[in-house]
Amino acid sequence: MKIKSVKIKNFKSIKDSGEIVFSDNLFVLAGQNESGKSSILEAIEAYENESFDKDTLNFEEEQGGNKKQEVSCTYEISDSKKFAGELVEEMQKHFLIVDQFLDVSKLEKLKNFTITKEFDQQTKLLSVKINDTALGILNSAIKDKESILSEPDGTESKIETPYLLIDDNNEKDIAEIFFSLSPQVLLFNDFSDLLPDKILISDLKDKKEGVEGYKAVKNLETLLSTTFVEIAGSSNAHKHASTSKEVTSLSVTFQNDWKQKIYGNNQVKIKFNVENDNVGNLAVPTVFFYIETKDNVPLELRKRSKGMRWFLSAWLELKAKEDHRKLVILYDEPGLYLHIKAHKDMLDVFKFLTNIKGHQIIYSTHSPSLIDTNSLHNIGLVLNTEQQGTVVEGLTTSKINTDYKQDALQPIAEAMGLEPLKDFSILLQKNVLIEGLSDFWYFTGMQKILNKNSDYKLVPGIGIKNGKINHLVSFCIGYGLSWLLIMDDGANPQNTRNELKENVFSGDENETSNKIKILTGCDGVEQMFERSDLQLLDSQIQEIKGKVKISDSRKIILARSFASKVERDEITRKNLSQTSIKKFTDIFDWIDKGFQK
């Protein structure tokens, strides 16, 4: 199960977020500082822990008006059969019904459900509700039981009544039962939970939660077969043996779980000693923590990088909750304390947690190196607008066209290796996207030959297979630019067209045809020319089964040669066949028509 979408109202910079859809188990909230990325994550955490307070109220509502805050989470059920079984068990337990009073086959129709939590800052009351559709399916699954009704005349009759009536008195209980089966949310947003260099045994014994690193130490303690207080109270011999055993087990567990290299190192060992420390000339029992890497030198944590400590503390937090239900892990600016070289490690760890461990991760960033350009569909642009406050839009669904969008797109552009958007020269207001460099050089040459000087730009996508075309389309849509797409006639281009048709044009064939042109019968741009045309570049070019054949290694060389010869007027319209001229004229006419619509 995962969070499919959220809606947030009146929370910090958020007035009304609308529906924020998380398209995959690994989702990025991208935007500049102060855009509201942190507010989104904190709102989800407040929903999870029911920790709304006056400081989280939208700043425009603090002095009056609406004091109600609302967060809704829609959950997508991945295993309906398993969920139905867990729901039956929890319902029986809560309502103290021994009989099998629910029809499991009907419950298995549940594919998602929405829990809404509303907190009134004036009354301090919290309401918890479940959506009507899920409640209706549950209600239809409640079986009837047979009862005996005694009539006034002494006769008896059998009647059937539901085992459970759903009404205003128990709707909140039912919503909380559903919520109890949802993934647990964990926000990791700062260094307050970092493992410290040391901690006093007395602080652990007295449960001083405010002591630096207390939570991280308690997280580590859940992985031990004993406690630090018990170790400190044992004899020296037993203390040494116990510590050695626990350190070995702890380090092995860490290395088994996190096989990814951290700063090029996957042999990280966690060590600790329980011994006396000199505090005010007194010998005070203390736990000391160390990290040892491939250099075999155990160093205090403060002497290790913050990135290393961040990895370790994140692991402890996750490990302490491993026996709980699946997690939705929220990371606020995870790369903030990491060297840029460690960002790839971080992305690998995120993929490990989602693909192998089965957790869901939502993280915020404005760092280009923490954006995977192969998964641009998993990015939400976080925009802070004057009218709407913080909102989130996808690259292909963005409707806002302001400087806010430019700021949000900045790290994505840099991740793709494009120039900064403030001085964006890769794309213009009008763009013709074509497959690769061969297409670019041939179209550039033919544009000159046909005297098609215009205000649009030819932009090569450098191949269909690597998804570059999809990225460029996403950028044009997200940045409010006009675009057309021209591709060869092959399996990959056709798949790309079908994908864009569904995702961008909602299956509309006419709109797709107006924006995307397939070069029918051409498995390469060279097929637009007659052999005699290409022999102007190389007299040895031959045809095989009626098609011109050029080796892949020579395609770009010949295409660039064509553009160069056209530029020097060595190839002109008079040199080319009328068939080729007609084909390219039709394409450029389609381009002109496309930008007029």
Image (cartoon, grey):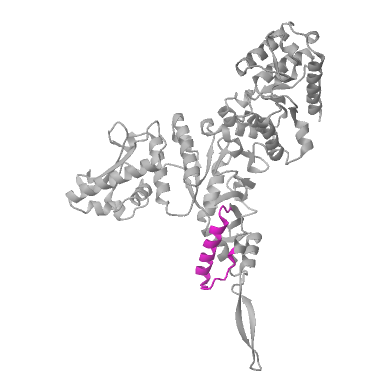
In this view, the residue in front, 84 or 307, is 84
Instruction: Residue at 65%, 29% (x, y): give it.
Output: 469
Residue 581 position in % (x across, y down): 80, 16
Which quadrant of the figure has residue 526? top right
Instruction: Residue at 61%, 56% (x, y): give it.
Output: 113
Instruction: Please say whether residue 175 is one of the residues in the magenta stretch.
Output: no
Residue 85 position in % (x across, y down): 53, 62
Res 400 visible? no
Residue 64 position in % (x across, y down): 63, 53
Instruction: Residue at 40%, 34% (x, y): give it.
Output: 262
In this view, the residue in front, 216 or 260, is 260
Q: Is residue 519 left or right of residue 278?
A: right
Instruction: Please say whether residue 81 is one of the residues in the magenta stretch.
Output: yes
Res 46 visible? yes
Please provide the residue range marked out in magenta.
76-104
Instruction: Residue at 79%, 10% (x, y): give it.
Output: 573
Q: Is 171 drawn above or below residue 284 in the view shown?
A: below
Which quadrant of the figure has residue 162? bottom right
Quadrant occupied by the C terminus: top right
In this view, the residue in front, 344 or 283, is 344
Q: Is 442 drawn above or below residue 110 in the view shown?
A: above
Q: Is residue 439 left or right of residue 296?
A: right
